[in-house]
Amino acid sequence: MRKSSRWCGAQGCGILLQEYLLGTEYIIDHVSCDGVHKTTMLWMYDFQIVNESRVCVAQQPISSDTFIGKALIEYTRNCLDALRVCNGASHTEVMWTSSGPCLVEVRRELRSKVGEDKIGRKPQPGTPRVRRSPLHR
């Protein structure tokens, strides 16, 4: 496998094995500021078998007021804390298995380098900085 080519022609430099998890997969997105996490989206993947393959055909919103919603948000925030995600947007995927939630993926949603604007320029001295609003305290 390490010496085989990918469909796009690139060589693989390593192999990653992942445990197969049986359950329902959820998406929990957050935005964080100074370690305070706010949930922005909570969805459930809707997978179906299409042509003998498991395909995501839709995503269904989940209420944060339900037992599963509250549990997923708490679990995800604990994961973000453990990974030291303090600022910015994050996309997390969690599988709800028979033994409870299990982390699948955390992806930081960074659009530019820290300290630069979206086109890569460093801000000029005196440029206003984003401040936390009283609602986020």
Image (cartoon, rainbow, N blue to C red):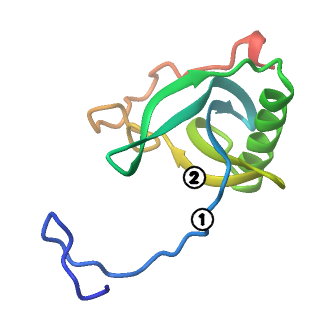
Query: In this orientation, which residue lies closer to the viewer: 39 or 119?
Result: 39
At horizontal 39% and vertical 37% (from top left) the residue drawn is 111
Query: In this orientation, which residue lies closer to the viewer: 93 or 109?
Result: 93
Query: In this orientation, which residue lies closer to the viewer: 18 or 76?
Result: 18
**Screen quadrant of the C terminus:** top right
Residue occupying the far left of the picture: 9
Indicate left or right for 127 with 24 as reference: left
Element assignment for label 2: strand
Element assignment for label 1: loop
| Marks 2/1: CA–CA distance | 14 Å
At horizontal 87% and vertical 28% (from top left) the residue drawn is 67
* Mark closest to the chain's N terminus, 2 or 1: 1
Identified by mark 1, the residue type is Tyr
The location of residue 54, given as percent across then percent down, is 43, 48
Query: Which residue is disc 1 drawn over?
Result: 20
- Quarter location, residue 102: bottom right
Indicate left or right for 128 with 51 as reference: right
The location of residue 116, given as percent across then percent down, is 38, 37
Q: Report the label total.
A: 2
Q: Label 1: how many residues lie within 10 Å, few (<14), some (14-19) or many (20+)?
A: few
Query: Which residue is disc 2 drawn over?
Result: 105
Indicate left or right for 33 with 90 as reference: right
At horizontal 50% and vertical 18% (from top left) the residue drawn is 128
